[in-house]
Every structure is written in C-alpha cells, then in structure tokens.
Amino acid sequence: MSVSKSLLVFAFVLSFCEGVLSQCNCAVDPDNTICEAGCTYYIYCQSGTDVTVQCPVGQVVDVEVGGCDDPENVAPPCGVYRNCTGKADGYYTNYDDACLSYHYCLNEQFQANNLCPAGLVYDEPRQLCNWPENTCPPCGDGSEDPFEPCPTSTAATTTITIRP
C-alpha cells in the first residue's frame, strides 16, 4: 500500500474514532451548550462542530457555570481531592459516588478525578469503565461477564491449639 493510501486510511479511521468517542451531536445540540464533560475537559457545540476545551492544570470542569474553575468551587466528584498517600501510580475507584468516577495518583500525589460515561462504573482491576453486570462487586454484580467470573469469597478457617 502506498504512503498516500496509508495516510488516507489512517485519516478515515481517526475521523471515525473521533466521532464515536464524542457523545455530542452538534447537528442538533444547541450552540454553547456543554454536551459532554469529564473532570478535566468539556465539549460544547459551536456552529455544528464540537469544540473540546481542556481545563488548565489545577482546575476542573464546573458544568453548572459552563467552564473551568478551582476545585474548591466545584461540586463532587470533580471538586474533591483524593488522598494518594501510600498509593502506587495508577487509577483508583471513587467508592463514595457508587463507582461512577475514579481518580489518578502519580508519585503519591492526587492528579485528577475522571467520570465514567453514563451507565458505566469504574472497574479497577481492568482499569476501565465497564457495564455493572461485567464488573465485580462492590461496583457491579459481575452477573454477565463470560470471560472472567468474579471471585467467590471462601471463608478461611484457622485452627488454634490451646495448650494447658
């Protein structure tokens, strides 16, 4: 395949993926209305096109005011700092909002909260947002995961010998 054909295929795939990733429908969504948001970015429609805004470092999305603001001025989960002391670098479930969001720790420092798309919960072992029926407790019930059933808890017994 020639380089120009490869670039054309790549551009097509990229444009297709971008359309799938955004939940906005700017053909019908009104201008200047936030149609998708995470804790560190939001997307709004302008003249039929989606516009992505990344919040400056240290700020989070405040959907109520339609922009970025300091975390202490924003409602949970985006405005909540998480304790990362003693945690390895990675993503962790926010259990206080029924697993609808997760946060990122780096060098034992809280970096940001992130929201799962509507209807999904954070699946920490897999490090992704997933359907509740495919996620093990406490965030889901794991009832429909055909590949990795949830571990069942087995009560361990310990025998203690008492010496007279």
Image: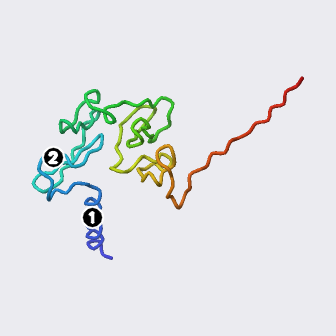
Hey, which residue is sitting farthest top in the picture? Answer: 164
79 relative to 121, above or below = above
User: At 12% from the left edge and 51% from the top edge, which residue is drawn?
Assistant: 30
Q: Earlier in the sequence, mark 1 or mark 2?
A: 1
Q: Amino acid at mark 1?
A: Phe
Q: Residue at x 27, y 59 (%)?
A: 18
- Estimate the x, y position of residue 19 in percent, counting from the top left: 25, 60
| Closer to the camera in the image, 95 or 155 | 155
Q: Give the percent coordinates (x, y) of residue 143.
A: 51, 55
Question: Outermost residue toward the left?
Answer: 47
Give the CA separation, mark 1 to mark 2: 23 Å
In percent of width and height, residue 80 lies at 35, 31
User: x, y (%) of residue 66?
Assistant: 18, 39
Q: Is residue 39 left or right of residue 147?
A: left
The quadrant the N terminus occupies is bottom left
Check the picture and name the quadrant holding the C terminus: top right
Looking at the picture, which amino acid does disc 2 mark? Answer: Thr
**What secondary structure is found at the residue carrying circle 2?**
loop
Give the label on residue 33, or none: 2
Tell which of 42 and 96 is nearer to you: 96
Number of numbered discs present? 2
Residue 110 found in image quarter? top left
> In the rendered view, would you say 5 is above or below 118?
below
Q: What residue does disc 1 label?
A: 16
In the foreground, 134 or 40: 134
Q: Is residue 146 left or right of residue 12?
A: right
